[in-house]
Amino acid sequence: HARTVAVDDGAGCVKLDLGFMVFNKVTYSHMMEWLEGLGVEMERSDMSFSVSTQSKGGGGGCEWGNGNGISSLLAQKTNILKPSFWRMVCEILKFKNDALTYLEDHEHNPDLDRKETLGQFIQSHGYSLSFQEAYLIPVCTGMWSCSSQDVLSLSAFLVLSFCRNHGLVQLFRHSQLPTVKPRSQSYVNKVKGELESIGCRIKTSCQVKSISSIDGAGYRVLEKDGSEETYDSVILGVHAPNALKVLGIEATHHERRILGACQYVHRDIYLHCDQNLMPRNTSAWSAWNFLGTTSRGFSVTYWLNQIQKVESVRPFLVTLNPPCVPDHVLLKWNASLPVPSVAAAKAYLQLDQIQGKRGIWFCGVYNGHGFHEDGLKVFACTTCPFFLLDLPRIMN
């Protein structure tokens, strides 16, 4: 989630963030405080979004956005005459209120059941098919690379949290959120300096093969190259499946049960300049752009020029799981994202059953909703006592 690359735009070198995008003061309060404490410079970003349910050059479907007010909303002029489109618009306004009310109730009352699926939420609130096909399903399938049918089985609580935290419930007043101006590499370097200043030894590019206990006297960490290290305790800042993999047969029943419930989707990601993966109508272009069909699925394209205030004549785009390999590819990589399933929502509430119980701590964004804020909070709870770091307000 912290990767900065330098590319040539023909007029000079441009730095782009490929993992870190934006955050906000309400749901990323600890992240904001932490970055401000490190002295990281921030700037305002744009989190507008668009939906295009037709491929480039295709007919029919629906295309709209919220980046430039009414001109984006009516980027496809035929939408003006579609009653289903205007019903969708009204339902998005309703969806914001319904989602915020639902989240407020469930976040302040842990006794409320979080087993409700997104499909059950949609049905209980009476949303139309046009709302689902031209808004909610494109957003969800684009983000989690699942089928339209699988979207309805996702956790209502986790999906609604994601939509709220990333401004996807705002129709006319899209979010103006902060982002890191000198890119994420700047705060990675600052954190590295902080840790080294208190005597921490940092090793990078080390592939861990396994972690095994030493007769109750700590743990042996075996690397892929055969080298070993021994430690009193271990903090695993990796995805849940990777944690189980390195623990191997020594993983306890509860660790396998809880971490095994955290599912991930693996995505191909491209940095490119191919405008075919953006809305056909340029007035609909937004920071996030969901494009595809309900039958074949959707991809999401981030317009970095808009999000990171990149001044260049070239459009720098990041697309997750495009329908085909884009033209003008600058970089390709793979990443995994936690799936907001009902099982994951349940597992999240049970993580305290395995944290530190045998000198092993699990520090990952699955300790929440898959956001930077979740990773930071669990970092504070698990690692601050070891490093003697002062993050008292996060600990409370």
Image (tube, helix red, strand yellow):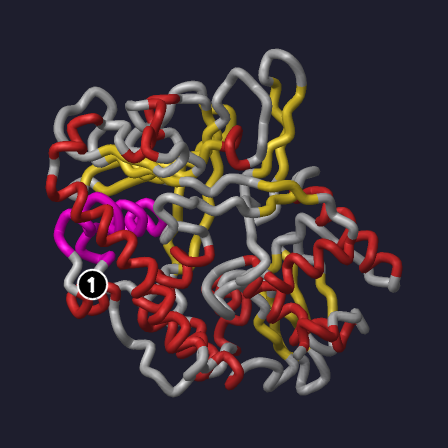
With respect to residue 14, does 296 lie above or below? below
Decide whether residue 145 is among the magenta residues. Answer: yes
Q: Position of residue 199 (x, y in %)?
A: 87, 63
Secondary structure of residue under mark 1: helix
The crowd level at tag 1 (other Cα within 10 Å; few <14, some 14-19, many 20+) is some
Image side of residue 130 versus residue 373, left or right: left
Residue at the spot x=55%, y=39% of the render? 18
Residue 231 visible (yes or no): no
Q: 201 or 308, which lies in front?
A: 308
Instruction: Name the residue that disc number 1 marks.
Output: 122
Q: Nearer the viewer, residue 306 or 119?
A: 306
Please say whether residue 44 is one of the residues in the magenta stretch. no
Q: Specify the segment rendered in magenta.
A: 128-151
Q: Position of residue 197 (x, y in %)?
A: 88, 58
Q: Which is more toward the observer, 363 or 95?
A: 95
**Residue at horizontal 33%, vertical 77%?**
114
Seen from this angle, which residue lies furthest top? Answer: 10
